[in-house]
Image: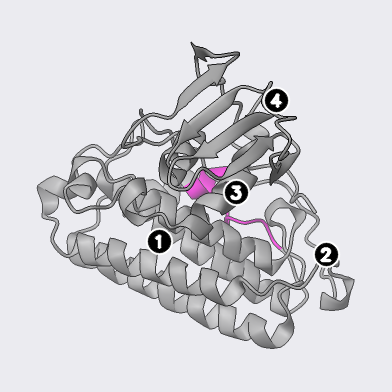
Amino acid sequence: MTGTTQDTTAPRSIDPAPTSPLDSPQAAPRDDLPAIRRDAAAALRALTEAVLSLDDEALGSPSSLDGWSVGHVLSHVAMVGDALARQAELAAQGETAEVYEGGAEGRAAGIEAGAHRTGDEHVDALTAAGARLEAAWSLTDSTGWGARVTYRDGTVADVLDCWWREVRIHATDLGEVGTVRGLTPSGTWGLAFTDHLLDFLSPRLPGPVLVVRLEDGARSVVGPEGVRPAAEDAGDDDLTTVTGSAADVAAWLAGRATATDPTAHRDGETVDLPALGPWPSGVPVRR
């Protein structure tokens, strides 16, 4: 399965007027943020360590994203890290701004400019972005994770979720050079992350499906309205059933290569997997 350059941080126009952190949208407190920070940092470390072993030929080789080399993927990860750190830094001051300086054109130009770095330069850019993000998260611990941001009209907690997705997903987008180093969804995406992706990417489905997880038989209904536990009385058994490992189902929803393609059945017959809609990049955060 071939990936695309879909970006959960697509730029949009905004009102640049400063806001107070006290004006932030109210959301339920979250106790998962420290674990997300740790997993995102681990993903960045794994990606950076992989880059240390890549020569110029490998950096210029095709990634699994159409039209992008490995260098383009690495440039994007560093750039989106800086952009999301900026969202958190501004939010701590009660300010907002577009995700990418210069909007869509600035994003495209920045990725292209960084795509041709040497291996050492890529490592430096990724390391600097990681350090800036960690400083931004530490600042947010003091100023509040509910502060408003431009990204999806959400909060800094949503920015952390976005970084988690960006670094975990794109670390598996290096094509063959990543696959031989174990940077694949099945090798690197834990259950907390795949559960998060099911919820985030559920709007891509045209309607609800019953997802059966191979590892333990867990059953969930996943669809445009989100994720819920399946009914215990077989009340959801008339839905199309998608069966696969947690990583493979999440990778399918994300448009990434799977170790083993999930299967779909309805009324006892094998059917095609549902067609997926666009990535929910410009959709406001669902509360």
- For disc 3, the marked residue is 103
Residue at x-position 63% and y-position 75%: 89
Q: Earlier in the sequence, mark 1 or mark 4?
A: 1
Quote the CA–CA distance across marks 3 and 1: 16 Å
- For disc 2, the marked residue is 17
Q: Amino acid at mark 3?
A: Gly
- For disc 4, the marked residue is 207
Viewer-proximal residue, 91 or 114?
Answer: 91
Residue at x-position 35% and y-position 28%: 1
Mark nearer the viewer, 2 or 1: 1
Mark 3 in CB contact with mark 1 (< 8 angstroms): no
Viewer-proximal residue, 83 or 148?
Answer: 148
Q: Which residues are magenta?
A: 97-107
Viewer-proximal residue, 79 or 264?
Answer: 264
Q: Quadrant of residue 281?
A: top right
The mark found on residue 12 in the picture is none
